[in-house]
Amino acid sequence: MSTFVPTASTPAASSDKAPLVDVSVTKVRCPGNNAGVVMSAGEGEGQVGFTVRRDGAFMYDGLLNPSAKRTVDVNVGSRKSAEIAVEIEGQGTANYKVTSGCAGKRHNRQGKAHALPRTGPPADLMGKIATAGGLVLTGGVIWWFGVIWPRPRPDTPICVDRSRYGRRRYPNLKL
């Protein structure tokens, strides 16, 4: 919830030709923590200069044409208040105190910061299980290769220089 309280303004002598400017400050909008300074000029001739300050520091200045409306956003920190001063040339200064009720983080109803619930097993346990499974699988593959490799050798040497119809490499092999 945001509040603003206008304080006393100090009017100065205004010229008859310059338009009168109405100044208002909106409540703080929470997603951006911004308060809008709305200035609307009335009928008249020429332009009117304005300056917007927050806590005494310069924020924005510019010119308003007759029958023009301008909004300047002023950033107010989260859960902080600020003094906004709007100085209109020929009319004086209007001071506003603005308070931001916006929270910095999303909060649940108990006022604690919102976090996702922990579900599932811890990640380090899953990593250990995956490593153990990989080691068991690798050991099984190595054992299987050890059983089938090296194959039994034939009793007689392999005859490389044999004819196509010569003695078979494995004479007892049935095809």
Image (cartoon, rainbow, N blue to C red):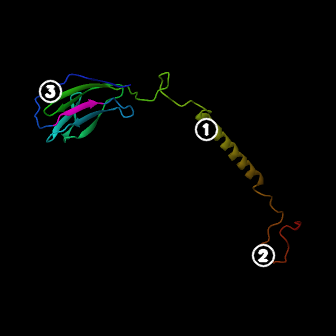
User: Cα distance, mark 1 to mark 3?
Assistant: 72 Å
Main SS, magenta region, reads strand
**What amino acid type is highlighted by mark number 1?**
Gly
Classify 10 Å Cα crowding around label 3: few (below 14), some (14-19), many (20 and above). Answer: some
Mark toward the viewer: 2 or 1: 1
Residue 101 on image: x %, y %: 37, 25
**What amino acid type is highlighted by mark number 3?**
Pro
Residue 98 to residue 73: above or below: above
Residue 158 on image: x %, y %: 79, 68
User: Cα distance, mark 2 to mark 3?
Assistant: 120 Å
Residue 165 on image: x %, y %: 85, 77
- Name the residue that disc number 3 marks: 11
- Name the residue that disc number 2 marks: 161
Q: Give the numbered dot on residue 127.
A: 1
Which residue occupies 26% across, 30% down? 24
Residue 156 on image: x %, y %: 83, 66
Front position in the image: 64 or 1: 64
Front position in the image: 161 or 18: 18
Placement of the N terminus among the 4 image quadrants = top left
> Is residue 171 rendered to the left or right of residue 12?
right
User: Cα distance, mark 2 to mark 1?
Assistant: 57 Å
Q: Secondary structure at mark 2?
A: loop
**What amino acid type is highlighted by mark number 2?**
Asp
Q: Earlier in the sequence, mark 2 or mark 3?
A: 3
Classify 10 Å Cα crowding around label 2: few (below 14), some (14-19), many (20 and above). Answer: few
Residue 171 occupies quadrant: bottom right
Query: What are the residue bounds of the magenta stretch?
Result: 19-25
